[in-house]
Structures are given as structure tokens and as C-alpha cells.
Amino acid sequence: MASTYKTPKLDNSSSDWTKTRFEYTVGAGVCAFMGDLGGQDGPSKPFLYDFEPTQMRYSLSGGARYYLREYHAFKGTFSYARVRGSDATTNYPNRHYRNLNFKSPILELSGHYELYLLKPKILHLAGARSTQIFNGNRLGAYVSAGAGVFYFNPKAELNGEWYALKPLGTEGQGLPNGPKPYKRLNITFPLGGGVTYLLNWNYTIGVDVSYRWTTTDYIDDASGYYYDNDIIAQNNGKLAAILANPSVLLDDVPNPDWYTKNQPRGGSNSNDTYLFAQVTLSHSFAPSISNKPYKQGKRKKGKSYNQRKKNKRENGKKGKSYKTKGIKEKKKRFKAPKLDFGKKRKKSKIRTF
């Protein structure tokens, strides 16, 4: 009969955390872009001070985590996200009438070091190392930092069509006295943290927030100064000239001189950044963890053969012997096998001479 013990005997080993040191993780959430386009009603500001909630898009990620030590882990992730910005979302005149817009995918491969400030402690039932339990605390918390590479490709919308901006050289990239063409593959430095909640069966749900600093200011294709639009039109075409200065499409621009040669087109004082906020789910392929009450089977001691035999004698029953168990000691007679090879031959009479 199984018995339930409220406080089973536990074996607290310093190496228990190694049983769940490797796990897979997926995440889904939002991505926010902080750059030169759109933002709040005022000049461009770094970090979250220029955050525009209406331009948030989605982000997805997947990866693996490996615990180097009990409170130290390394996580590698691949992330896909969308970012977007538009000057139409701000009422600050210099930015609103600039009339720039963009969207871009973000493909990121990054590595993160995680330092856990709080983590559920895993114990084992004594004598059953494959069964793991909590010590009552399900919550975890960590901070993280890392580095990675990411790819982007900004596009702008004009009359319902989207056009890639890098080949157009909207700030005179590659032209005389113009800046160098920017690269779409750059480096990112994630910094953030999160909280986790340990579920049964080795699943962990959590919330992860990570801010990404980058080495480029061209995620939104705006960084430096306006180039001569006539030269851009001659070398790169009329479409490039319009997307370099889309303020020409508006009729009510207060001061067109804001958007002429050598005037600021973007803010080159700080690079573009973006932020991930995701709900994560992790799973460790290890012995199952649970905090449910444990049933430890209590094995009954079996009676010996002599004890059973003695009890039957006391009850007037004859104990079984090997002869009464159906074991035959008679020798089996040998039976010749029957051989049938088809038609039987007729027996021929033996003739004697």
C-alpha cells in the first residue's frame, strides 16, 4: 500500500543543478525601435526618451541555454523582428515635415551571459535520484549582457510601393564628398534581464527585456546631412531624389530650406537602437521536476517458504511438494517419429527359393 509523506527525506547535493543545466528556449513579443525617424514631439533623443509605442512590431526568438555554474549561464539565440518609424507620428515641425518613413527586418544571432540573482533550488528524494522537487521557491531573476551580429534592410513607402533604400544612396553615399555606403551587417550589444517562474515537468515561463545598442546609425537610412538632390537625381535617378527628400511631396512645408544641402537629415550623435520584450518558455530534457505530494511505496516483507509451510500445517492443510505441483518423474516413453513421404508403397512378399 502506498503512503503519502508530507516531508519526504531529501538528499541535498551540491551537484543537483547539473541535471537541468541544458535547456531549449523560445520567445515571442514586441520590438521597439529608437532612431532618427518619428518619436515624441521634440528633437530626437537617445535611449527610451524618444520611444513611440504606435511603431512597435513583433519579435520572435529561439535558442539554447547552458548553465556553466549554478547561477551562471550562457544563452545563444537567433531572433527575427520587424522595426518601423515614420515622421508622421510626431508633431515637431522639423521632423514632421521631413516626411521620412521606413521599415526593416532584423535578423540577429547573439550570445548572452546570464547572472542569476534568484533561482529555484532543486532537491532529490533520497534513494530516487531520477525524481526532483522544488524547495518551495518557483521564482527566478537574472541580469544579462552579450554581443551579436544582425542584418537589416531599410525600405521606404511611396505611393503604396516599398523601395529598398541602400541602393539609392539617399544621403549621397558613394558620390563625390559624400559618405561611404553603409553596411547592412553590423554588431549589436544586448543588455537586459528577466524573471522566470518554474512549472512542473521541467517547463519554465518567463519575461525577458533586452535593450540593443548597435554600431550603426543607418537602420532607418537617416544619419547625416542632405546631399545635393539634383546630383542624386542625375546619378541615382528621380526615385532616389524623391526618397532622399520626400518633403517636396508636401504643399504646406513651413520652411523648405530646412531640407536643403548640408542641413541635418538625421542625428549622427548617437546610433540607432532597438528593444525586445518577450514572453519566454524554456524546457529542460532531464528527469521531471514537480512539487506535488510524493507517494513512496511501502513494500511488504514476504513470508519465507518454511513460514508458509508451517502456517499451512497449523491450518490443517498439506503443503505442496514438488510431486504435487504436477512435475512428473516418470520416464517418458520414446515414440518413433512418423515419416510420411507421399504414397505408401505396397508391401512386397518375401520370396524364398
Image: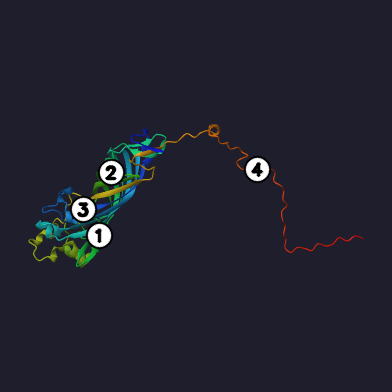
Where residue 59 appears, as percent x and y from the top left, is 26, 53
First-in-chain label (3 vs 1): 3
User: Is disc 1 in contact with disc 2, using a CB cutoff of under 8 Å?
Assistant: no
**What is the quadrant of residue 85 in the picture?**
bottom left
Dividing the image into 4 quarters, which one contains the N terminus? Answer: top left
Residue 197, label in figure: 2
First-in-chain label (4 vs 3): 3
User: Is disc 2 in contact with disc 4, using a CB cutoff of under 8 Å?
Assistant: no
Nearer to me, 78 or 18 = 18
For badge 4, the amino acid type reads: Lys
Nearer to me, 10 or 108 = 10
User: Is disc 4 in contact with disc 3, using a CB cutoff of under 8 Å?
Assistant: no
Give the CA distance from mark 3 to mark 1: 19 Å
Residue under circle 1?
166
Give the CA distance from mark 1 to mark 2: 44 Å
Q: Residue at x 30, y 48 (%)?
A: 281
For badge 3, the amino acid type reads: Phe
For badge 2, the amino acid type reads: Tyr
User: Is disc 3 in contact with disc 2, using a CB cutoff of under 8 Å?
Assistant: no
